[in-house]
Amino acid sequence: MLKANQKISIGWVLFRYLLALAIIWGLYTELFHRNNFDQLWGLFRQNLSGTALGYLLFCSFLMPFNWLIETFKWRAFTQPWSGMPFRQSWHAVLAGVAASMLLPNRSGDYLGRWLLAPKGQKTQIMLATIASNYCQFLVLLGMGFPSLLWLGYYTKSWPIAQPGLFLSFIIGLFICLLLLGVVVIPRLLHHYADRIRGETWQGFFKFLQMPLQQGLDITERYSWRVFAAGFGFACLRYGLYSVQYYAILRFYGILLPLDAALAGVGSIYLLQTAIPLPPVLALLARGEIALMIWGIWGGNALSILAASYTLFVLNLALPALLGLFYIVKKW
């Protein structure tokens, strides 16, 4: 008879293998069983023999730095207490990329990093991931909303006028306000509650503070200096990702002014963030958003889709496969 600990261990091993198989199946289905896969592959091969190959090589060269910066950002929140070596943090981040293929809005980061976290640090790892993703999310929103407004002003049209995209816009705004409420408001309430005279008002403030206590615990766990480092790495990663997108557009012959390209990239990232689907199941929606944005300048539809899918493969699919290796390897 197997002991309880042995049964749990075998269960976790099976879970990891099933997760790996599900992610591989999802990637294979979405990437290779698309109606226009032959056309996209043909266009990719055609551009490989052109003078624009350098843009693809440059974009590919930046890919590992994208996730290295993400690792540094996450370590800014784990190092005050964890002491995890950089290599282990890197493996955990890639495991989070793999798990995120099946879960919406980067929520797989929590599962992947939790799986590779040291024993006794599971809860702290979750809090650090929340804080790290919060920094990146605010940067996406902080750059995305002005980009979308600038794009509407520049083109004298408003991309969010379509009902589906308008709903995504509202969802993104709601998430932004919710996160601000979870992180910022509790700190303010905690700061001012002790300064207010009168037991009634103090009790009222503490009552408001109760449902937001988790956000308060997260912010009090880290200093403002740590959050500043997290935001710095988040901004750096956003800039690198934007450069990658611009390079892949050039590779496929989509030539845009730099300011228009940056506004389009910011708008696409904002709208993609609001899609409540895992990346492996949202390729079609990502492609439609890219068509809507870059189509404003008359970009070729097939080239736009190819750019979106190529960037997905470079920045998500390939790191996810490497992350799967670390998930399965973890016994």
Image (cartoon, rainbow, N blue to C red):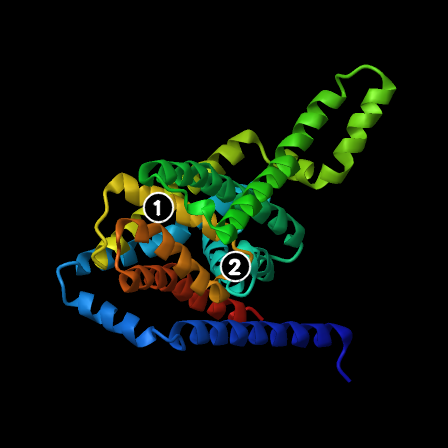
Q: Provide the secondary structure element on which disc 1 rests.
A: helix
Q: Residue at x 31, y 49 (%)?
A: 296
Whole-percent x and y of residue 295? 31, 53
Whole-percent x and y of residue 241? 36, 49
Residue type of the residue flagged with mark 1: Gly
Q: Nearer the viewer, residue 16 or 156?
A: 156
Q: Nearer the viewer, residue 132 or 309?
A: 309
Q: Is residue 48 above or below residue 145?
A: below
Q: Is residue 153 above or below residue 189?
A: below
Q: Which residue is mark 2?
A: 96
Q: Residue furthest top?
A: 197
Q: Residue furthest bottom?
A: 1
Q: Is residue 71 above or below residue 100?
A: above
Q: Provide the secondary structure element on which disc 2 rests.
A: helix
Whole-percent x and y of residue 184? 62, 32
Q: Which mark is residue 316?
A: none
Distance from label 1 to label 2 (Cα)? Answer: 27 Å
Query: Quick check: can you spot residue 72?
Result: no
Q: Give residue 153's quadrant in the image.
A: top left
Q: Which residue is mark 1?
A: 264
Residues at discs 1 and 2 in contact (Cβ within 8 Å): no
Q: Position of 142 compared to 243: left or right?
A: right
Q: Residue furthest left?
A: 51
Q: Position of 329 compared to 218: left or right?
A: left
Q: Nearer the viewer, residue 11 or 146?
A: 146
Q: Nearer the viewer, residue 324 or 295?
A: 295
Residue type of the residue flagged with mark 2: Gly
